Amino acid sequence: MNETLRNVALVAHGGAGKTSLAEIMINKAGMTTRIGRVEDGNTVMDFEPEELKRQASLSTGFFQLPWKKHTISLIDTPGDQNFISDAKLCMQAAETAMIVVDAVDGVKVQTEQVAEFASEYGLPCAIFINKLDRERADFTRAVDDAVQCLSPKPIILQLPIGAEADFNGIVDLIGMKAYQYDDSGNASEIDIPADMQDTVETERETLIENVAEADDALIERYLEGETISNQELRDTLKKGILSRTFAPVLCGSATHDIGIDLLMDFINTCLPSPLEMPPKQGVTPKDEPAERKPDPSEPFSGFVFKTVADPYAGRLTILKVVSGKLGGDGTFYNATKETRERYNQLLTIAGKEQKPATEAGPGSIVAMAKLKETKTGDTLCDEGNKILYTCATPMPILISFALESKATGDEDKIYISLSKLLEEDTSLKLERNAETKEILLSGLGQVHIESTIEKLKRKFNVEVILKTPKIPYRETIKKKVRVQGKHKKQSGGHGQYGDCWIVMEPLPRGTGFEFVDAIVGGVIPKQYIPAVEKGIVEACQKGPLIGAPCVDFRATVDFGSYHAVDSSEMAFKVAGSLAYKKACDEANPVLLEPIMKVTVTTPDEYMGDIMGDLNSRRGRVLGMDSAGKNQVINAEVPLAEVQTYAPDLRSMTGGRGMYSMEFLRYDEVPNQISGKVIEQIKAEQEE
């Protein structure tokens, strides 16, 4: 059971041809009558309106196809930086990452990124060099690029016959056979072209040396001059792929159906089945190490790696079975939520369709509809044998927009509908900012947010306007002052009397607020001191400049007076707030802004432009590191200057740069900018 299953994730940067590759494989397996084209918007894998509009995968597609007594389960991941988080989560469900490299463009940043995810998960890899029929396609350059940028070490398994428009065949270096393809994608065996003989001989020798690295005994025999049989080569190749010693390189053209049959045969014969993978590590509820072998006789366990929200069909939960078996219906235990859950039907996914399944064993990717508690990242298991797996975390968010409803009073509807989309896309973040009173939607880029808003309208009929969020400024003081706060009110009956002197002084950045009771001799009775503090704490939520919270100061109450009859907690609270306001005016108040730690990864040639741009954004470049053929720039930049950095970086680097950003600290806004900001915010407040 499942030894003939191959879960293969197609991964690469956007536009490398992953979806086209999936389409031709589905068609060759006889599952469709015509080959879908991304440009024509009729592919099996991309079917959401947002994907058709952009001619790109925005979400991972799934399809199981039969091929020569095996089942190839394709996981077609998005390659656009905006949706790379979905690729990261769905790659967990594969046993192999098939890295698709564009023979024209070579390896881009996102391809390196998905190769890193594969490394993080310990996933075996293979490389398919696509688009060899295109103008300026160059097999050797693409392989060199892969060798320089990707790991495990790429080793050549096939060579192309012809180049660009004349590309029409493939030489298999293990079988030492050549295949020529007609316009319908049918292969016929031919002699290895005479002009390729020397190259083929040299590359085969190199291949044998590379493959032998995965087996000490084989390398000894090879060095002693023994002949290595093709079967031994294939067996050792499989062993080396599984141990991530190397990543074999295959080649072809998805759109011209060249080399696709050889690729599918290779998936069957050389890529691992779920049953050949090492046990998956987890922990018990008591936090003790535990593991499950990919064995049907082990207790059931699995994990949820994707959720699809549908307003009509409800939630579709997609999971990977790690061990044991699931029946067509039944119950399971959700170890993450510590609850039992029932499912009525097991489904397999074929593009936008779901088909009923009777059972699922180790390695199976299946879906369940309308689960109440279970979400992405949850571990499912047998209640008598509990285990928890650590699931991949989504990519860090990069950009935020404030949402404004087009229809008044739709705020709650926005929040509820978006919460459902967040179950589907865990790389989105939704929050209400109490300070700025805005609903904020954050994600990996502008396209990510825009496509979510399109989906919101289509699925839930809720329309919103995107705005740049307000910056959460803070205020503080720069000078030490001592002031009196006195509240005295006399009216019929009891009056009100509270009198306190406070010393207000600045504290180091990030310290927050400190209150010190320095009263001696009972000039203010003990029971009223907390009221003074409360008065200051409440008042400092609004600073004197723009009404932003005031932070990083110490207030010391050191003197005051009281009235035996008229003093009360309320009176001293008012006195405390009066003292704070008076002190703020005298203590040289200043504006603080959030500073972000920004890490930019970019190819060498854009370094100068990016550093110049960061400087123009009031950024401070802290240093640089190299990572493969890319450079990593570390900088500190004010949030106000990088709120829309994602599209700017994309246009500066032609989509090859990427960045991450996290909050670092608050810093003073420079004088020349501070005045403009205060003016602008006050004008907005008066509107």
Image: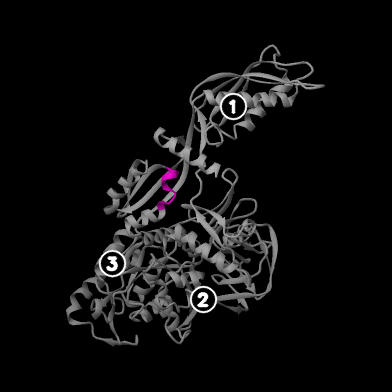
Q: Is residue 247 left or right of residue 450?
A: left
Prevailing secondary structure class for the magenta stretch in the rendered image: helix
Q: How are the residues colored?
A: one colour
The residue stretch that appears in magenta? 638-645
Instruction: Specify few, some or many for label 2: CA neighbours under 10 Å numbering under 14, 14-19, or 20 or more.
Output: some
Q: Dividing the image into 4 quarters, which one contains the N terminus?
A: bottom right
Is residue 362 or residue 308 the one in the foreground? Answer: 308
Q: Position of residue 363 (x, y in %)?
A: 54, 70
Q: Is label 3 or label 1 in front?
A: 1
Q: Is residue 253 shown in magenta?
A: no
What secondary structure is marked by label 1?
A: helix
- Label 1 to label 2, Cα distance in Å? 63 Å
Q: Earlier in the sequence, mark 1 or mark 2?
A: 2
Give the amino acid at mark 1: Lys
Looking at the image, residue 656 lies above or below residue 184: above
Residue that badge 3 annotates: 142
Q: Position of residue 432 (x, y in %)?
A: 59, 49
Residue that badge 2 annotates: 351
Residue that badge 1 annotates: 581
Q: Dividing the image into 4 quarters, which one contains the C terminus?
A: top right
Q: Quadrant of residue 319?
A: bottom right
- Whether residue 444 is visible: yes
Instruction: Specify few, some or many for label 1: CA neighbours under 10 Å numbering under 14, 14-19, or 20 or more.
Output: some
Tell me the residue at 75%/23% (across/down). Answer: 568
Q: Quadrant of residue 190?
A: bottom left
